[in-house]
């Protein structure tokens, strides 16, 4: 049963659309250079609109562990996704500061990249083509993955069913693939979720 993460939500209408679809996760981006950036205050407002059962994931790029832990411990987010150049030392430091779950993202270009990701001590790993590039990578690299993972990078309503059928990832993560004109598209969100579930999501 592949889980779903709709990432980069930034408006109340995005939350409303997600609430109707009930993915397991939604993502709030705290990287200031991203066009999907939300402030902690805005994220808190959006989090309050989420129905029970949807976990809010904060996406960070090389943020201080103390900053991340504060948002986790204050309940602004339920999980943190480390999507920069974070090290095992950063993961260990976060473990000291919070008991909340951590996802560490890795760029996968070779089998060695996959092995490095699998050694992460984060609760979950996310495998991507890059830092939010919106492009896919060679999924055949993941056929013998040794631990569950979030699949990201270039997913869309058109190709996600194939990814789920081929790989059976723990979860799929989408952002640009459910946008039109740089903003979330309710119809694309619904089509993405439907495609995952038809391919074996639930």
Image (cartoon, grey):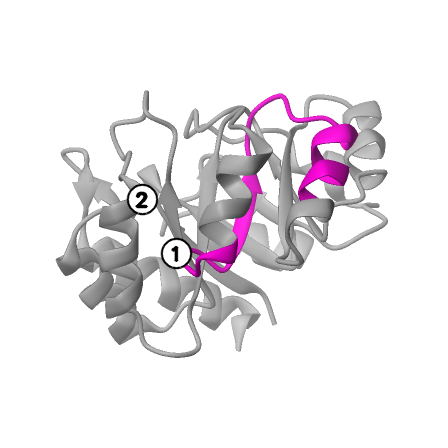
Q: Residue at x 54, y 24 (%)?
A: 62
Residue at numbered disc 2 = 40
Side of 135 relative to 105 (left or right): left
Q: Residue at x 41, y 63 (%)?
A: 195
Numbered tag placed on residue 137 in the rendering? none
Tell me the magenta residue range.
Answer: 73-94
| 88 part of magenta stretch | yes
Q: Is residue 26 above or below residue 70?
A: below
Residue at numbered disc 1 = 76
| Image location of residue 171, percent across then percent down | 58, 57
- Is 5 in front, or is 92? 92
Callout 2: SS? helix
| 89 part of magenta stretch | yes
Q: Residue at x 28, y 34 (%)?
A: 37
- Is 83 in front, or is 30? 30
Q: Which of the image's four quarters has the N terminus?
A: bottom right
Of label 1 and label 2, which has the lower sequence position? 2
| Image location of residue 175, percent across then percent down | 36, 42
Which quadrant would residue 113 be assigned to in this image? top right
| Image location of residue 120, percent across then percent down | 79, 39
Which quadrant would residue 133 be assigned to in this image? top left
Callout 1: SS? loop
| Image location of residue 35, percent across then percent down | 25, 28
Count neighbours of disc 1 (C-alpha within 10 A) and say few if under 14, some if 14 to 19, many if 20 or more.
Answer: many
Side of 49 relative to 30 (left or right): left
Count neighbours of disc 2 (C-alpha within 10 A) and say few if under 14, some if 14 to 19, many if 20 or more.
Answer: some
Side of 128 relative to 44 (left or right): right
- Separation (CA) of disc 1 from disc 2: 7 Å
- Is 8 in front, or is 65? 65
> CB of mark 1 within 8 Å of CB of mark 2?
yes
Q: Residue at x 31, y 62 (%)?
A: 47
């Amino acid at each position: 049963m592949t889980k779903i993460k709709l990432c980069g939500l930034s408006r109340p209408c995005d939350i409303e659309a997600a609430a109707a679809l009930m993915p397991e996760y939604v993502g709030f981006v705290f990287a200031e250079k991203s066009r999907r950036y939300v402030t902690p205050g805005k994220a808190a407002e959006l989090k309050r609109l989420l129905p029970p059962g949807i976990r809010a994931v904060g996406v960070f790029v090389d943020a201080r562990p103390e900053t991340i832990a504060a948002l986790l411990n204050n309940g602004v987010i339920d999980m943190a996704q480390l999507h920069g150049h974070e090290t095992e030392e950063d993961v260990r430091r976060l473990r000291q500061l919070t008991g909340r779950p951590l996802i560490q993202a890795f760029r996968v270009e070779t089998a060695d990249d996959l092995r490095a990701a699998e050694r992460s001590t984060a609760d979950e790993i996310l495998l991507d083509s890059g830092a939010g590039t919106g492009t896919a990578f060679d999924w055949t690299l993941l056929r013998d993955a040794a631990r569950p993972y979030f699949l990201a990078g270039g997913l869309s309503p058109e190709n996600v069913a194939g990814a789920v059928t081929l790989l059976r990832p723990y979860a799929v993560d989408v952002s640009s693939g459910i946008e039109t004109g740089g903003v979330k598209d309710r119809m694309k969100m619904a089509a993405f979720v439907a495609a995952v579930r038809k391919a074996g999501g639930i």
